[in-house]
Image (cartoon, rainbow, N blue to C red):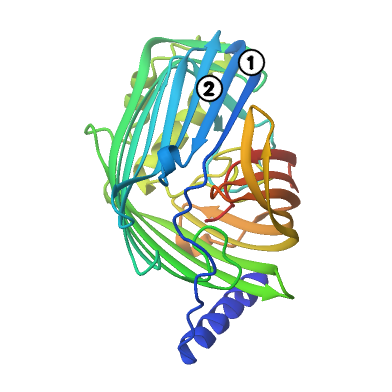
Amino acid sequence: MLRPLTLSLLIAYSSQCFSYDWIPERRKDQNPTQPAHLVVPLPYSKPGIGDGLVLMGTVSNVAETTADITGLFVTGDADGSIINGSEVPLFSDVLFLDFFVQNINRAAISNYSIRGISNTSEDDFTVLDLSVADELNAEINLTFFDRRLNFYYSYRDFEYQVDAIRNHDGTLIAALGEPYTNSESSDSFRISIDLTDDYLDPRTGIRFDLAYQDHDAVSINDPDFYTLNYMILGYIPMGKIDTLVLNYYQSDARVQRQGNTDPASIRAELDMNCAPADTQCLTAEQELVDNFINARTNGTSVSLGGDLRLRSFPQSRYQGAHTAFIGAEYRWNITQEATPFDYFIWKDVRTGYQVAFFAELGTVSETSSQLWDETRHSIGVGFRLIAASGAVYRADFASGNEGTEVIIIFDYPWE
């Protein structure tokens, strides 16, 4: 019942907007240039990786432009850097560049025993020990009508190298005979129609988003597929300054050519060399083989879990060929004022405090007909500081089927 109710509310709100030819006026400048900065040292301790320190620094609206630059520098048992830039103006307030460059020499990603959303426990995963985790993302945004109509083109290229498999607590299961290397490049085209009162902090209106992403096969083993992603967001004003946000999102993978799904060939690619009596190694190997077969047969849509959707679950907790999600968030704006602050490591202008209460429901499957057969949910509360620089300093506390997660980030969810 929740899915049709949410869709009905969004469609009704959308039709009301268009039937009365109502497009909200922008309530403030859509290209803020208020300078701000934040520098934070973050210690880390990760099984299989070790201990160290991450130094994170972000500078907003560099040189009185809209450009924001963030850097993460990793030292200790892991080493590397991440540089992220957003809203870098290329031509006036019409053409912008976003980029993301990652170069990390030790990392870990979780590989859950099966794809989809079946009843696996939170500990039912292995850890892939990476010695290379490189990624490049570049996106061009062409925008018109005060950011109401946006066209995006992005290019992504990544490579990671797996050296070992560990269990969920970091104990070594198997070291690969030769590192397994995976790489992919993709092009993406996206259009966004924003009929709200503010591009960065909307309180009324509706937003549509449609994206096409082409996943090129790097080798004959890889599948050739594309994904189509759809999103609709409705912002319904509640009282004078509060907002109810409704979100529907769907991602579907369409395979044009399947990859290599022969189990013996995949085992040779992995080169785990499990001993015949090592049941833990053989089980981990079979789980990887099964996931490879599903991914190369059906493709992979946008995952659930992390800081955007199903926030009580770890990043990329649920993966499959088809994803659907609905969410509701009540944003209670406690204050509205322009108050500069400068704590040496953190400088900005506060324009408001916000408390958000949210509920989310998501599903993932290998076939579109099985979507919504099984679901997972998250509920929680978030605290936000809205700033004149355009940043939203967000702390969310989410609870769901597998416990709780705490998220610290600098943007709204879903948007």
Measured from the top left, where is residue 386 in percent x and y?
Answer: 64, 51
Q: Residue furthest bottom?
A: 20
| Quarter where residue 328 is shown | bottom right
Measured from the top left, where is residue 398 in percent x and y?
Answer: 73, 46
Looking at the rendered structure, the kind of residue marked 1 is Pro
Measured from the top left, where is residue 43 in percent x and y?
Answer: 66, 17
Left or right of 415? Residue 125 is right
The reply to whether dot 1 and dot 2 touch (C-beta < 8 Å) is: yes
Q: Nearer the viewer, residue 392 or 65?
A: 65
| Quarter where residue 99 is shown | top left
Q: Nearer the viewer, residue 233 or 145?
A: 145
Q: Compared with residue 259, is residue 26 higher up or lower down, i.e. above or below?
A: below
Left or right of 346? Residue 68 is left
Image disc number at residue 38 = none
Q: CA distance from mark 1 to mark 2?
A: 9 Å
What residue sits right under mark 2 in the picture?
A: 108
Image disc number at residue 47 = 1
Q: Nearer the viewer, residue 397 or 385?
A: 385
Q: Secondary structure at mark 2?
A: strand
Position of the N terminus by quadrant:
bottom right
Report the number of discs: 2
| Label whose residue precedes the other's in the sequence (1 or 2) | 1
